[in-house]
Amino acid sequence: MAVQSIVELSDANFDQEVLKSEQPVLVDFWAAWCGPCKALAPTVDEVATQYAGKLKVAKMDVDRNQATPMRYGIRGIPALLLFKGGKVADQIVGYVPKETIDRSLSRVIGAEYDSAPAVAKAAPAPAVEDSMAPAAVTANVIK
């Protein structure tokens, strides 16, 4: 793990580090042999740095710890589970861009993330405009 603020989880410390955490926790379920997990690792490191002090970021190796992934129904990796108040608030499976993780954090945790970069907050706006344009064109064609 490249970032020191990322907590390494085990079946033994999961409840204490995640379920009893005062802060929301993003848990990355991964394995050393998993290519997409390796590709997502720098993004998880970036999230840990960006949200330091507001979000705990943790990683769990599913090969070394099998009880916790089984408990949460982890069937595919990488899998990111976002915990808030000791409960799963959101889940992302597979390799995703950082913007997807940022949107999940904003949706689940909301106002706590006012300091998130403007780029991450602004990213969804163009997508909405873009998605409206084809609908307008389609509506004109149908008429």
Image: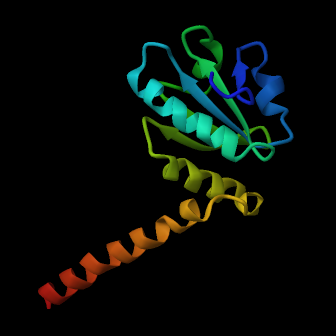
Q: Residue at x 72, y 58 (%)?
A: 113
Q: Residue at x 48, y 66 (%)?
A: 124
Inspect this view and state whether residue 76 appears.
no
| Whether residue 26 is situated above or below residue 102 in the rendered picture | above
Inspect this view and state whether residue 58 appears.
yes
Count of numbered circles in the view: 0
**Is 40 positioned to the left or the right of 90 in the image?**
left
Quadrant for residue 126, please give it: bottom left
Q: Quadrant where the N terminus lies?
A: top right
Quadrant for residue 118, please give it: bottom right
| Whether residue 27 is situated above or below residue 50 in the rendered picture | above
Residue 61 image offset from top left, x and y in percent: 59, 16
**Is 107 positioned to the left or the right of 31 in the image?**
right
Q: Quadrant where the C terminus lies?
A: bottom left
Q: Residue at x 43, y 30 (%)?
A: 39
Residue 42 image offset from top left, x and y in percent: 53, 33
Tell me how the rendering is colored: rainbow
Quadrant for residue 53, please give it: top right
Residue 121 image offset from top left, x and y in percent: 58, 64
Residue sticking out furthest to the top: 64
Q: Residue at x 57, y 25 (%)?
A: 29
**Is 135 positioned to the left or the right of 16 in the image?**
left
